[in-house]
Amino acid sequence: MNEQTKKKAADLRSARWFAHDDLRSFGHRSRAMQMGLGPEDWEGKPQIAIINTWSDANPCHAHFKFRVDDIRRGISEAGGFPMELPAISLSESYVKPTTMLYRNMLAMEVEELLRSHPVDGVVLMGGCDKTTPGLLMGAISMGLPCIYVPAGPMLRGNWQGNTLGSGSDAWKYWDERRAGNISDEQWLGIEGGIARSYGHCMTMGTASTMTAIAEAMGFTLPGATSIPAADSNHIRMCTASGRRIVRMVWEDLRPDQILTKAAVENAITVAMATGCSTNAVIHLIAMARRAGIDASLDDFDRLSRTTPVIANIRPSGETYLMEDFYYAGGLRALMHQLSEKLDLSCKTVTGVTLGETLEGAEIYNDDVIRPLSNPVYQEGSLAVLRGNLAPDGCVIKPSACDPRYYNHTGPALVFDSYPEMKEAIEDENLDVTADHILVLRNVGPLGGPGMPEWGMLPIPKKLVKQGIRDMLRLSDARMSGTSYGACMLHAAPEAAIGGPLSLLKTGDMIRVSIPERKIDMLVSHEELAIRKTQWKAPEPAFQRGYGWMFGRHVKQANDGCDFDFLETGFGPTAGEPDIY
């Protein structure tokens, strides 16, 4: 132990379970011995939880089944004792209606796993969209030393010599298939070529956005989030993370020393520069508020105006994917490029400042990671619009939509459910033009339920066949971070609780101005007041169980969709368990 060591063996949290000469500690020790362990496994050693979100239903985390052994090795090498604790996996590919419904469940599970077990620190294994915020929210609330191990992006997709990006190219080629330009055989080839290895999406979707945010906030080893899942450097990173968490326990380096307002603003700035997913807004607000930090949509819009997109990665960029980003220098290089816009004094899990971790970072391809003087987009990835349709805000990704929609006025075409919208969109006789604004409502946090990724409404088939590939769309849902287009999302308050979106009618004119950050329906106050008296609240989606609890406690999108009783400011955090 060096001069940074703050704890002694007797101070370890796990000692409360193992160190005392009483009947209860006898029980803990004897049950450990039942598993073939001995005093040398726990005496004087930090007990390190490994929260593993592996499952057979999560292709993004398929390698976690054996990466956990690499983390174990690092923990053991550093003199700690590893304890794997599995948690809900939240596969973006398979969990329905949406993993967002269960993000808070994962956060609660992580917090209570850590509180109830004899652990001194934790390694968090995640990557698929909601696992990063869910794991970190729980760990932040518990307050033990923690380090995040990202799953890493999968390898580039490939089909007939074309580079494929997960999600982004699925939407692109699906429209071509709907237009009759893709054969069954070609479609099968795309299916087999778009996801070529384990790991999360290799576009700058929600997965890559959230792991980048975790690194920018200081919760990963430097450069960890850029490493492709299939790269041998990923194995070394896992082992190094295992070694580092043991030192963090002895140093008593906890989340409250890392997650500050400055760290949150660093994360927002980095997210904007990467061309981040719109989902970043919801998750980062929730993570910050778990630490008692007031983060809001205003922070995102303010920093977006002064932070250009410099990562030329799909869907905001035109060509490159996360594998290219790694070879170009990765997130360390991008943050080094952004140094003048970051607070470099923030502490990280390394025990040193962010600035120190960026020393020596280089860019090896300045078309992938652009200079500030030659950005992909002059402002940040996201813009927050407000007006009488979304008084609490909605979010759009200007860097990934057609510039002709930056200022637009057009008639609304309103759908009250996804099935209604899906059926109408395929009708080639639908009364719609490219000037219409498609609206899907009742799909927010309560209405969805769970705020599913339905916000990238398909272009009507009639327009697809005319060559139209983008148009304005509005909803109280989210969209996949791999999506693109002129989609206005997270409209708050949502329609299901009587937000203004619930009062909109087909044919009403909507005015949108991204430069002015405005979105308004051109309907008189008197008419809206009449419509309000006619609105009826929908029936609750759940009558029992977790969904019932979700419906009564989830907050709106602009507040991060956390449960009202989990934010730090709502009430005292539960303390350490009694051991009798």
Image: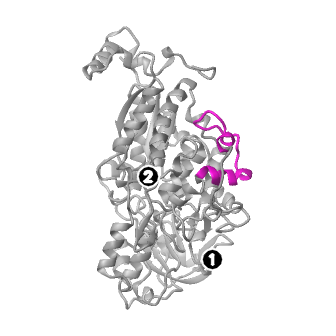
Q: Quadrant of the C terminus?
A: top left
Q: Quadrant of the rendered structure where residue 526 is?
A: bottom right
Q: Which residue is mark 1?
A: 406
Question: How many neighbours does mark 2 have within 10 angstroms: few (below 14), some (14-19), or many (20 or more)?
Answer: many
Q: Nearer the viewer, residue 99 or 370?
A: 370
Horizontal arrangement in the rendering, residue 95 relative to residue 499 (left or right): left
Tell whether position 345 is magenta: yes
Q: In the visual, does 258 lie left or right of 503?
A: right
Q: Residue at x 45, y 20 (%)?
A: 45
Q: Which residues are magenta?
A: 331-358
Rendered location of residue 106, percent (x, y): 40, 45
| 399 or 548, nearer to the observer | 399
Residue 190 place in picture, x, y as percent: 36, 72
Disc 1 residue type (three-letter): Tyr
Q: Is residue 401 above or below residue 443?
A: below
Q: Which residue is mark 2?
A: 130
Residue at the (41%, 39%) spot, across then down:
110
Q: Is residue 494 magenta?
A: no
Residue at disc 2, secondary structure: loop
Does residue 225 appear to the left or right of 115 in the view shown?
right
Q: Nearer the viewer, residue 70 or 520?
A: 70
Image-quadrant location for residue 184 = bottom left
Label 1: how many Cα within 10 Å (few below 14, some 14–19, many 20+): some
